[in-house]
Image: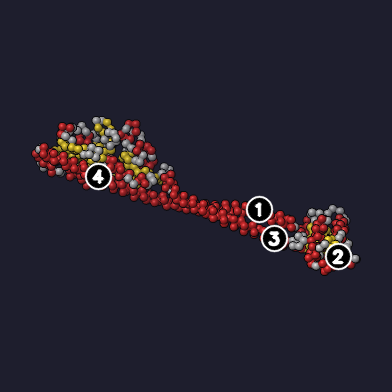
Amino acid sequence: MQKAKKLLADNVRKMFPVFFVTSFVIIGAVIAVFLYVFYVLEKNKNVRSLKFEKVASIQLRKQLIKAEFHTIISDLQILALQNELMEYIETGSDKARELMDIEYLEVCKRKRLYDQIRYIDNDGMEVCRVNFNHGQPQIVPKEKLQNKKDRYYVSNTLALEKEQFFVSSFDLNVENGVIEEPLKPTIRFGTPIYGKDGKKHGIIIINYMGKELIDRILYGSLKSPGNTMLVNRNGYWLCSENRSEEWGFMFPEKRDVTFQNRYPEEWKTISNSEECQIESRDGIFTSVKVCPIPDEAGVISNAEYSTPQTGKYILGGKEYHWFLVSHLQFGEISESLEEYKVRLLSIGIALLIGSSLISSLIARVLVRRSLSQVELYYSANYDPMTGLPNRANFDSRLRQALAEAGRYNHKLAVLYLDLDGFKAVNDSLGHAAGDDLLVQVGQRMLHSVRASDTVARLGGDEFTILLPHFEKDGDAERVAEKLVASISSPFTVKGKEVTIGASIGISLFEGENDDVDLILKRADNAMYKVKQAGKNGYKRGSAE
């Protein structure tokens, strides 16, 4: 028993790594689930925050564009009513023209918004012109002034009535039929000039440098995830963080590079909405329609977008519109959470390190508990001194053996053994010597029976032996004879040789009416008859 108990205890101790890994995996899985839930919650929170931020950002840029247009048209109105201009219309003097040049030069210097400011007469001839000249404004000499009557923005503006305004499409500046390099995004604003006589005396044209507007649109968005774009009503990019997408309508080879072609489904919604926010497989699109011309500006004419040279124009500020779009890809949302993911990972690693200590503690507790269960099992079923099965264990095995014997008609015997002369040894040599003797007796009994037989100690110097499945009559007697001979041989206890004997009663299974108590009683009675007959022998009991 001690060997089996030790082997079982060793196997339990070997389960420590299994307990540790199992608990570590379970705790790790729980930690992973919680961290994932926190990540998803933070991601959803981040998405909501980014959506709100994009709506606010787009609306802010819309107001910026409208404010910029309001400023430009206000400047145009002021220039159209300039005192020096009115004096020139009345007198045609060079002095008045020179004062106009100086005024235009100051506007160009102070505002730094306009690439050109021009006064053009009814015949399309430039009368005054100031160029921004890359930050060094200059008055163009009279001899270098040109006739611009063939330019669409001149003819369109000359066709307007008093207090009407021309606003060109947002395109690239073209000089002598060639797109100017480096690219110069431009919007031309014009209004007719009426003198005090009520007659039209020409037009004012200012070329607004669109790069200023683009820079303002893109400013600040570079620090925030997503691409902020300005798209015209035909789906062409006017402004994008991906500069290669811009101005597709100006270059024949890029005519198909449009927002509409890139995101057809999203464009259907955007182009038909005043404002919208769409979540699709390509990401989150936030859009607002921008009608930049102030309502109070009156009727506005602007060229069609198809080509900047076309002479077509349409009326109405609502027709002049763009779309401000923010495109936030899902990958960018994940990138914006990198820092949070790193924090979660750090927390996860720290928790896993802590969980390894907890797992180790759990494994130790489980091992101790299992060892306690092993100890409890053996203390409940085995005799602590000899290691043999105790009375409860023996009764359980006998009950099972009786059931099998009754079902399958097996032969079964129970031997009831009591030591002869044990008390004398115990009294003369002491209880420790008596205990040692009992252990030696148990070992001899185990060596005298089969591995399938059961040897149990009932208490004191009384033992029982269960012999299930023996084949021949007389086998039980032969085992009893072997036991008597083995136990009668001298023992060495505390260095002294002692001799004892054994009285054995035999009880055979005699039918299905036999139970544990009955078969043990027959064996016990037979054992006492051996005692009465002189001890150190065996006898088979019979039903009375």
Q: Residue at x 51, y 52 (%)?
A: 349
| Kind of residue sitting beneath label 3 | Glu
How many angstroms separate mark 4 from mark 3 (CA)?
A: 91 Å
Q: Estimate the x, y position of residue 278 in percent, counting from the top left.
A: 39, 46
Question: Which SS class for mark 4?
Answer: helix
N-term-proximal mark, 4 vs 2: 4
Query: What residue is pinned by disc 2?
Result: 420
Q: Nearer the viewer, mark 3 or mark 1?
A: 1
Q: Kindly indicate whether the residue at mark 1 contacts the one at mark 2 (C-beta within 8 angstroms).
A: no
From the viewer's perspective, tell me whether residue 6 is left or right of residue 366. Answer: right
How many angstroms separate mark 1 from mark 4 (CA)?
A: 81 Å
Q: Residues within 10 Å of mark 4 (few under 14, many from 20)?
A: many
From the viewer's perspective, tell me whether residue 159 is left or right of residue 544. Answer: left
Which disc, if any, is residue 69? 4
Q: Residues within 10 Å of mark 1 (few under 14, many from 20)?
A: few
For this rendering, which residue is in front, 249 or 381? Answer: 381
How many angstroms separate mark 3 from mark 1 (CA)?
A: 16 Å
N-term-proximal mark, 1 vs 4: 1
Which disc, if any, is residue 375? 3
Which disc, if any, is residue 14? 1
Q: Nearer the viewer, mark 4 or mark 3?
A: 3
| Residue occupying the far bottom of the picture | 427
| Residue occupying the far right of the picture | 533
| Kind of residue sitting beneath label 1 | Lys
Q: Nearer the viewer, mark 4 or mark 2?
A: 2
How many angstroms separate mark 2 from mark 3 (CA)?
A: 32 Å
Q: Estimate the x, y position of residue 109 in percent, counting from the top left.
A: 21, 42
Q: Residues within 10 Å of mark 2 (few under 14, many from 20)?
A: some
Question: Which SS class for mark 1?
Answer: helix
Q: Residues within 10 Å of mark 3 (few under 14, many from 20)?
A: some
Q: Residue at x 69, y 60 (%)?
A: 375
From the viewer's perspective, tell me whether residue 508 is left or right of residue 291. Answer: right
